[in-house]
Image (cartoon, grey):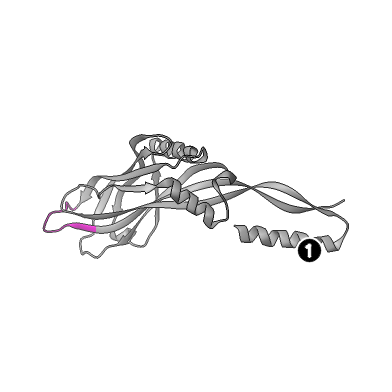
Amino acid sequence: MRQALTIFGMLLLAMTTMGDGCLEEKVIDIVLNSETCAEFEENHGSDSGADPVTVDYGEEIAEILLENGYTRDDITTASIKSAAIEVTQFNQPTAWQVSGQVNVEWLSGGGSGGPVPIVNFSSESVPGLLHNKKPVDLNAAGVDLMNDALQAFLDGANPVLRFTITFGDISPDPTEQDRMIFSWKAYLLMNIVLSDTIEVFDLI
């Protein structure tokens, strides 16, 4: 994003040689779409979900901003926009079909709440999701909690979240002789609006 702005500024600067005018600073909004994810390891002979995953959400957002040349103070607004799931490792003959939800709990850092569902998935094929990031439905209760955590980050806090899995239907039923084993990720796409200042060519 920074690179694109630099190129744009260079083009505008070059235009100063083409006629009368001056450069002036303008404040613009920049939309940064970025993902965070929770990684889960399934290995069980029942319908129980993976162990909970704790994410330092404030630290992850700070790293995303740093990679793009921004800080927390540059953010105007931030919100959760979409979700996806993807299986990253799977090597079994059983073609598991799973339904359930991803839950989120705000543990500390500017507030608390949950656990509440944030992602719903239904009759998903585990082998079909292997290296295939698929959009899934968001749950309003979880989105509200996540957006509150984002606002806490903007206010200076460092929210820490815990994600858990609740499986509904699994077909066929896993057993100790045929355990369900795979690794997967749940992605959350954030829409971050940042304020930035660039130089623009103002014709006189």
* Part of the protein shown in magenta: 172-181
Pick out the residue farthest to the left: 177
Residue situated in front as seen by the camera: 126 or 197 = 197
Would you say residue 50 sits in the magenta stretch? Answer: no
Q: Look at mark 1 in the image and give the residue it sits on.
A: 14
Q: Main secondary structure of the magenta part?
A: loop
Q: Is residue 27 left or right of residue 135?
A: right
As shown in the figure, which amino acid type bears the numbered disc 1?
Ala
Mark 1 lies on a secondary structure that is helix
Left or right: residue 141 versus residue 156 is left
In the picture shown, does residue 60 fall above or below 152?
below
Asked whether 179 falls inside the magenta stretch, the response is: yes
Q: Residue at x 13, y 54 (%)?
A: 175
Locate the N terminus by quadrant. bottom right
Q: Is residue 102 left or right of residue 35?
A: left
- Which residue: 27% across, 63% down? 90
Can see residue 162?
A: yes
The residue lying toward the viewer, choosing from 77 and 118, is 77
Q: Residue at x 88, y 57 (%)?
A: 20
Q: Position of residue 184 (x, y in %)?
A: 32, 56
